[in-house]
Amino acid sequence: MIHGITVLLYEKRQTGTDALHAPVYEEVPVEVPGVLVGEPTAEDIVNDLQLYGKHIAYTLGIPKGDTHNWDEVTVEFFGQKFRTYGGVTQGIEDLIPLAWNKKVKVERYG
């Protein structure tokens, strides 16, 4: 049976503003269970390097019903930190038979 792992997602929360009135954020870790971690294909690696200038490390499968913001955030799993990029790709929940309906790409970070 396919199952995911628990991933730490660092949510951005506004803590105030700086002297120029720009928002100041802190990153708060939140556990997200059941996330699939997949290896990118050779084609994904080449395309993302050419299109985005990013070195894709993994593709994450996000569980159905998850409401977290996965755009341009830090995630941690396997003892390493990664950064999401390229936006979340989402399928229609009712038409996908498994427990995951979104995916996002990550690159190594920090």
Image (tube, rainbow, N blue to C red):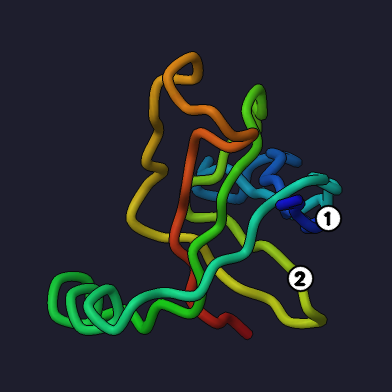
Secondary structure under tag 2 reads strand
Residue at image x 58%, y 37%?
Answer: 100
As shown in the figure, which amino acid type bears the numbered disc 1? Thr
The crowd level at tag 1 (other Cα within 10 Å; few <14, some 14-19, many 20+) is some
Residue at image x 37%, y 84%?
Answer: 55
The quadrant the C terminus occupies is bottom right
Q: Earlier in the sequence, mark 2 or mark 1?
A: 1
Secondary structure under tag 1 reads strand
Residue at image x 82%, y 45%?
Answer: 33
Relative to 81, say whether 26 is above or below.
above
Q: x, y percentage for residue 6?
A: 83, 55
Rounded to the nearest angstrom, the CA distance separating label 2 from label 1 is 8 Å
Which residue is outermost to the left? 50
- Residue placed under numbered mark 2 in the picture: 77
As shown in the figure, which amino acid type bears the numbered disc 2? Phe
> Given contact means CB atoms under 8 Å apart, are the residues at marks 2 and 1 in contact?
yes
- For the question of whether residue 26 can be seen, the reply is no
User: In the image, 103: left or right of 10?
Assistant: left
- Residue placed under numbered mark 1 in the picture: 6
Question: How many marks do you count on the picture?
Answer: 2
Judging depth in this view, the residue of 24 and 36 nearest the camera is 36
Residue at image x 50%, y 48%?
Answer: 20
User: In the image, 80: left or right of 93?
Assistant: right
